[in-house]
Image (tube, helix red, strand yellow):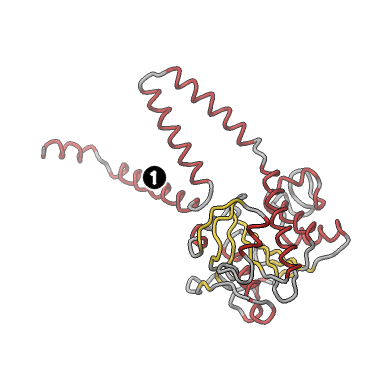
């Protein structure tokens, strides 16, 4: 046994150890990056299929190998042609309708729409729901006597992941003076992630959209739908919504995904009703503070 162990150690070189260490760190970083997003399931599924394919190749199972190869091609095409735009329109329509009804009822709301950055840790601070996104469910959650109405709702794709979630507040003086708690919570989460947040003010009923510490306020239901579709699915620009070009960008954006300030101006041109855009200068935006306490979004 000692001889076997010694022979193994003799074959291990420093470069091998470094190679394994770097690979392990990259894998850990990848899973940390996609934790809480739908990409986790995709990576796990692809890994399992790859392992099955490797075994099929090793044991020379030609029929199974051919089926897996064909399935990979078909699956890639299906993923490329998946109806992301249809899903974005459904989510935008449900959220905008719920926001309009809550505004009419005088009820506040805070709806966080997950994009690329995973919000699993934020969702775990609330009550996990994993229910289908619907107008009725959103209105029920934000009923004034509901136990969850003071927190934030986390939406992933077309699913309500959690309700009553706690968001970090933007703590600078300018936010304290100009915005209420819900808006400060929306600013706080959008400073740290790429989420889009819909806020319904309980005081004046205004519907606002927040993204990357930018706010477009006083949105109507059609305006909110158009803005959400463009944020959730930038490729919708091929239909020239908001004046976007067919590559999904707006004029002057250099091909990047549309920003909220661009959408706010475009929405006003489209509908004739100009929503107010609040684009805080960098000096007034609070910096990320790891020690900031996550507090519940209240009135």
In this rendering, the answer to whether 212 lies above or below 27 is: below
Q: Residue at x 74, y 49 (%)?
A: 249
Q: Identify the residue position indicated by label 1 in the image.
A: 23
Q: Residue furthest left?
A: 2
Q: Quick check: 213 left or right of 30?
A: right
**Residue at point 35%, 21% (across, down):** 59
Q: Position of residue 6 (x, y in %)?
A: 15, 39
Residue 107 sits in quarter = bottom right
- Judged from this view, the residue extending furthest toward the right is 272
Describe residue 126's horizontal placement relative to residue 278 as left or right: left
Q: Is residue 128 left or right of residue 299?
A: left
Q: Nearer the viewer, residue 248 or 17?
A: 248
State the residue at coordinates (73%, 58%).
96
The quarter of the picture where residue 246 lies is top right
Q: Is residue 266 above or below residue 11?
A: below
Q: Quadrant of the C terminus?
A: bottom right
Residue 218 position, x and y percent, is: 78, 68
Seen in the picture, residue 42 relative to 296 is either above or below; the reply is above
Element class at badge 1: helix
Q: Determine whether, in the image, residue 266 is placed left or right of residue 160.
A: right
Give the image location of residue 103, x and y in percent: 74, 67
Residue 296 percent across, percent down from the top left: 55, 72
Please identify the quadrant where the N terminus is shown: top left
């Amino acid at each position: 046994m000692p001889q076997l162990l010694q022979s193994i150690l003799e074959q291990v070189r420093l470069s091998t150890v470094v190679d394994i260490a770097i690979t392990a760190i990259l894998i850990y970083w990848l899973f940390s990056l996609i934790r809480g997003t739908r990409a986790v399931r995709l990576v796990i599924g692809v890994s399992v299929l790859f392992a099955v394919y490797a075994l099929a190749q090793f044991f020379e199972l030609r029929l199974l190998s051919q089926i897996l190869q064909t399935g990979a091609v078909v699956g890639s095409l299906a993923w490329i042609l998946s109806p992301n735009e249809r899903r974005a329109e459904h989510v935008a329509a449900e959220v905008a309708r719920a926001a309009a009804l809550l505004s009419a009822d005088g009820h506040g709301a805070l709806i966080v729409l997950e994009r690329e950055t995973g919000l699993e840790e934020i969702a775990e601070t609330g009550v996990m729901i994993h229910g289908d996104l619907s107008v009725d469910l959103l209105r029920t959650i934000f009923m004034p006597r509901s136990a969850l109405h003071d927190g934030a709702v986390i939406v992933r794709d077309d699913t309500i992941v959690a309700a009553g979630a706690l968001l970090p507040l933007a703590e600078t003086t300018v936010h304290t003076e100009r915005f209420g708690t819900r808006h400060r919570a929306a600013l706080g989460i959008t400073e740290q992630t790429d989420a889009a947040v819909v806020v319904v003010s309980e005081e004046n009923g205004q519907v606002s959209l927040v993204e990357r510490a930018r706010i477009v306020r006083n949105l109507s239901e059609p305006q909110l739908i158009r803005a959400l579709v463009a944020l959730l699915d930038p490729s919708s620009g091929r239909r020239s919504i908001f004046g976007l070009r067919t590559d999904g960008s707006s004029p002057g954006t250099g091909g990047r995904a549309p920003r909220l300030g661009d959408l706010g101006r475009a929405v006003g041109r489209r509908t004739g009703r100009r929503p107010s855009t609040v684009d805080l200068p960098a000096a007034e935006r609070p910096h990320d503070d790891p020690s900031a306490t996550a507090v519940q979004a209240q009135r």
